[in-house]
Amino acid sequence: MDVLKTLFILLIFPGGLFVLANGMVYEWADRKLVARLQNRVGPRWFQPLADLLKLLAKEEVVPESVNARLFVWLPIVALAGVLTGALYLPIAGLQPSYSFSGDLIVAVYLFSMLTLCTGIAGANTNNRFSLVGATRTLTQLFSYEAPFLLAMLGPAVAAGSWKISDIMAYSSTHPVILLQPVGFVIALIGLMGKLEMRPFDAPEAETEIVAGALTEYSGRGLALFYLGRYAELIAGLTLMSAFYLGGIHNQLDYIVKTLVLLLALAGVQTLMTRLRIDQIVGLWWRYGTLLVLLQWLVTLLLKGMVL
Amino acid sequence: MDFGKTWNEVLDRVKTWARLNSPWVIHFNSGSCNGCDIEILATLTPRYDVERFGIKLQGSPRHADVLICTGPVTLQARDRLLRVYEQMPEPKFVIAVGSCAISGGAFQGCYNVVGHVDEVIPVDVYVPGCPPRPEAIIDGVVKLLGKLQPAKQPPQEEIV
């Protein structure tokens, strides 16, 4: 029975299928919100599902110049990484399926797996657009990863624990968003960078470099990369609302808080145009990292005074 | 009732449904005067909002299902058009937009022109006009989707 229960948790609920389905719904909500903000009608509710099924039913072209094994396995590893990371999160208002001291670091690293795999996938092919896209993807990874991690560690430092459930318990009793507003903004923007949303979509800028690192992917591989991105959207929103918006205690809490964050993301996407890659790096290292370090210092000082 | 057969039928239906609802297009200009291209861009603007049908413009031929081709095919563009077409994964469809793509139009018989799009790659739908209106282009895509639906196809007449 234990094996069955574990498999159920891993594959269906709250891991696996549930995260993917939830991700598709949120992807639709994001596209619909952006469309409504641009005065359009927007896509129908099943759009991400139709896109996905169509891609899965299409031919997968493996170009001649690539390492075929790497080409086939990278999307699988990317998706598996995100889904594994999601197991440590309070998805849908439930307790995390698995939890140990220090799972925050593991989860954040598992979420970078998608970007890393995208970068390697781009570098694997001989296509010039893929190569430029891969360079930009990895450059962006190195620029937002440090401030994003630091912003996620802000509540961890205040809570005095590296465990996601402990930090959530701390944030349910303290207004973290008021105590660490800089960290919240930087985590939100870092999430947009992770998901390659509009101001940070230089890695897949379709007007310049076709489709970035994923130019050579078709059919199944592309579908799996998209699924990974949907799952990452869910994981990022859950992590942010657990840490900064007072924790997730029930299903209603989960839906309201993640949707509020999604609305903020859609608003920023509509307002901003694409930044150049050097502007992105400058933004993160010149302002993001310094501000979040300052925030850390204040948090530590406050903590020292209270104790 | 054979279970395998039923399963395949269901799978086919799901595939057709997904294809009907998510046609991603790529646009290629094989020597057009840019009139049709501007109309295609106008089709993609928020005013016509083709995202509500699931139509999305893709930059990479590897991601696209439908090749929207404008203009007569020039000698220079012929190889490129073939290459873009062959880079697309199956199943793929082609829409020829504008008079020149259908017949060569004003460029018919020019020394540097191969001819219409049909001479180079197989075309599924022709959208006439010089240039066609955005509504006509959307209608062309819808006609293509109608062709994909097995139920809506007219019964084939048998030739004795």
Image (cartoon, coloured by chain):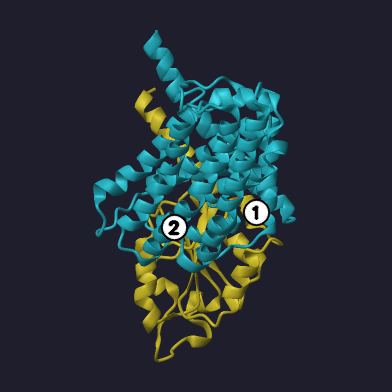
* Farthest residue, direction bottom: B111
Mark 1 on the same chain as mark 2: yes
Chain B drawn colour: yellow
Q: Nearer the viewer, residue A109 or B135?
A: A109
Under mark 2, the amino acid is Thr
Give the vertical position of A241 relative to B35 (above or below).
Answer: above
Q: Residues within 10 Å of mark 2 (few under 14, many from 20)?
A: some
* Chain under disc 1: A
- In the structure shown, which secondary structural element does the residue marked by tag 1 occupy? helix
Q: Which chain is cyan?
A: A
Under mark 1, the amino acid is Gln
Q: Position of residue B34 (x, y in %)?
A: 56, 79
C-alpha distance separating marks 1 and 2: 21 Å
At x 32%, y 53%, the residue is A61
Front of the two marks 1 and 2: 2
Relative horizontal placement of residue A101, taking residue A68 as reference (left or right): right
At x 37%, y 30%, the residue is B5
Residue A251, quarter of the rendered image: top right
Q: Which mark is residue A269?
A: 1
Q: Position of residue B87 (x, y in %)?
A: 36, 62
Q: Residues within 10 Å of mark 1 (few under 14, many from 20)?
A: many
Q: Is residue A43 at least partly visible in the picture?
A: no
* Chain under disc 2: A
Q: Is residue B123 at least partly visible in the picture?
A: yes
- In the structure shown, which secondary structural element does the residue marked by tag 2 occupy? helix
Give the vertical position of A82 relative to B68 (above or below).
Answer: above
Q: Which mark is residue A209?
A: none
Q: Earlier in the sequence, mark 1 or mark 2?
A: 2
Residue under circle 2? A139
Q: Position of residue B42 (x, y in %)?
A: 65, 69
